Image (cartoon, rainbow, N blue to C red):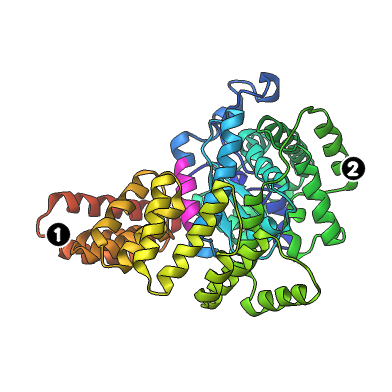
């Protein structure tokens, strides 16, 4: 049982109406071990505060692992390599320039709602609707920085200092979080509901956390060389599109109440930073167009594009790329290639996106040698980029070269890219190389990473039948079973 479970819930979570909504709206995400080199000591809780005693590093990592699995199991988490690589790179740019030592794990949720939330351990999630509503990169970076600030400023621990009787289980915390985020009717223990009245008293405290997160987000952006006006600008965009109504499509406003005065304060704060700042890059526009195509029904996307052409509008490179992605989604890879080959792009990151798309279409058209040739070159030029590595492993499998695929996937896992998609690919490659034990253990990891414990246990049973007294593989199986037991205790 983990203390302070309720306090772990992010104020950025989607909230339900009534009592549950009140509970979720008043709780703030945070962590207990993050520091930056740009924040004065006076801005942080003093040493010895409850913020240092609320949760150990091991407990926080355990909560994060559990919650991440539950999110994969309950939400449509996007595993699109290009989009995920981009948003992680943007977050890492902010981290590298600000000196923040907290590790963050970013997820993209395939949903048109405008929403984002932060959870313990630096687990952040951003809905595709929010990403596509941003007009430029500084606005998206502003949201990322704002969520980071909730974590680095330890709002979880500081909220806990004001609450009592919070000895709740991890299951209780996860139930509240998932009920709010997924809009389900999950039953909540009376202990949680009984605290709603108490948490209402701390709504003002939550608003002060919002102000603090705005302030530090502007600092983070300025330090990163990104336009610090992005924070206020994005809230202005949301107010304009929402008509000042905090409805279902704009859940982010429900948990981040925004007023004209808050926007004015943000602009005044941003003006304090002098210098030349980046507002936008073409890569953002490419990824934005990609996500629009991936989340919009293909016929709707293509029909709208045709209307724009009929009206005389000339699409830019990013929009052409987005339409090529729509044709790929539609299954017409010849049409996609025709568009992709006509796009002019000089920046390396744009050429990477274009060539990844070209290789993907060649693969689907059965031109595996061409696809592999392109991807091998991209991988050599971008060895740390997750997308070429993933697509090359897929292409090797399609070309009946599973040994090559297995090497790449294992490198990917060693670099910390452990998600359901990677484990599924590992299972496929191991099976193709005649390693059933490794294949079924990988499938167990796939299900475990989505919180599907019964399926994971079943795969381990199958793997064990193939071990033939292999002590190394048996140790792997036993280790996974221990993980399942730990998670099962918290669930049941």
Q: Secondary structure at mark 1?
A: loop
User: Residue 358: image x %, image y %?
Assistant: 49, 64
Query: Which residue is at 72% across, 65% downward?
Result: 315
Magenta stretch in the rendered image: 61-71
Mark 2 packing: few (<14 Cα in 10 Å), some, or many (20+)?
A: few
Observer-nearest of 14 and 40: 40
Residue 467 has which mark? Answer: 1
- Magenta stretch mostly in which secondary structure? helix
* Depth check, front residue: 304 or 420: 304
Q: Mark 1 Cα within 10 Å, few/some/many (few <14, many 20+)?
A: some
Residue 184 in sight: no
Res. 400 image quadrant: bottom left
Q: Report x, y in % for residue 331.
A: 51, 77
Q: Is residue 460 magenta?
A: no
Q: Examine the rendering and report whether any part of residue 30 can be seen.
A: yes
Q: Position of residue 270 (x, y in %)?
A: 80, 34
Q: Residue at x 50, y 74 (%)?
A: 333
Q: Residue at x 80, y 60 (%)?
A: 246
| Mark drawn on residue 261 | 2
Q: Quadrant of residue 203?
A: top right
Q: Is residue 67 magenta?
A: yes
Q: Nearer the viewer, residue 112 or 480?
A: 112
Q: How many marks?
A: 2
Determine which of the numbered discs, if any, sits on residue 288 in the image: none
Is the residue 332 above or below the residue 176 in the image?
below
Q: Position of 208 compared to 471: left or right?
A: right
């Amino acid at each position: 049982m983990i203390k302070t479970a309720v306090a772990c819930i992010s104020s950025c979570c989607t909230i339900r109406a009534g009592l549950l909504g009140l509970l979720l709206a008043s709780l703030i995400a945070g962590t207990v071990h993050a520091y930056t080199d740009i924040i004065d000591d006076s801005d942080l809780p003093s040493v010895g505060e409850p913020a240092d005693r609320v949760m150990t590093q091991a407990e926080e990592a355990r909560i994060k692992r559990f919650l991440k699995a539950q999110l994969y199991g309950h939400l449509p988490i996007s595993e699109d390599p290009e989009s995920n690589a981009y948003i992680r790179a943007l977050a890492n740019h902010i981290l590298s320039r600000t000196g923040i030592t907290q590790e963050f794990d970013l997820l993209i949720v395939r949903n048109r709602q405008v929403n984002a939330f932060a959870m313990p351990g630096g687990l952040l999630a951003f809905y595709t609707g929010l990403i596509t509503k941003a007009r430029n990169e500084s606005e998206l970076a502003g949201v990322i920085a704002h969520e980071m600030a909730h974590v680095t400023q330890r709002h979880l621990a500081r909220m806990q200092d004001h609450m009592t009787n919070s000895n709740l289980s991890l299951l209780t915390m996860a139930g509240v979080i998932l009920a709010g985020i997924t809009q389900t009717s999950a039953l909540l223990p009376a202990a949680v509901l009984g605290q709603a009245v108490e948490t209402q008293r701390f709504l003002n405290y939550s608003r002060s956390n919002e102000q603090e997160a705005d302030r530090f987000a502007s600092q983070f952006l300025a330090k990163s060389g990104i336009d610090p006006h992005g924070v206020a600008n994005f809230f202005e965009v949301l107010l304009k599109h929402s008509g000042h109504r905090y409805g279902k499509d704009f859940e982010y406003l429900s948990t981040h109440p925004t007023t004209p005065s808050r926007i004015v304060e943000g602009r005044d704060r941003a003006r304090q930073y002098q210098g030349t700042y980046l507002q936008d890059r073409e890569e953002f526009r490419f990824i934005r167009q990609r996500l629009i195509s991936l989340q919009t029904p293909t016929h709707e996307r293509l029909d709208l594009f045709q209307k724009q052409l009929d009206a005389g509008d000339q699409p830019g490179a990013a929009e052409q790329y987005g339409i090529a992605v729509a044709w790929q989604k539609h299954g017409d890879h010849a049409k996609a290639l025709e568009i992709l080959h006509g796009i002019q792009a000089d920046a390396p990151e744009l050429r990477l996106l274009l060539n990844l798309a070209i290789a993907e279409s060649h693969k689907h058209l059965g031109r595996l040698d061409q696809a592999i040739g392109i991807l091998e070159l991209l991988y050599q030029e971008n060895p740390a980029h997750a997308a070429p590595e993933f697509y090359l492993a897929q292409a090797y499998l399609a070309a009946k070269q599973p040994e090559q695929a297995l090497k790449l996937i294992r490198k990917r896992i060693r670099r910390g890219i452990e998600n359901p998609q990677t484990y599924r690919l590992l299972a496929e490659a191991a099976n193709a190389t005649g390693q059933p034990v490794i294949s079924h253990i990988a499938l167990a990891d796939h299900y475990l990473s989505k919180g599907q414990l019964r399926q994971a246990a079943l795969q381990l049973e199958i793997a064990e039948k193939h071990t033939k007294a292999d002590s190394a593989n048996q140790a792997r199986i036993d280790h996974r079973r221990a993980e399942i037991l730990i998670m099962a205790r918290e669930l049941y």
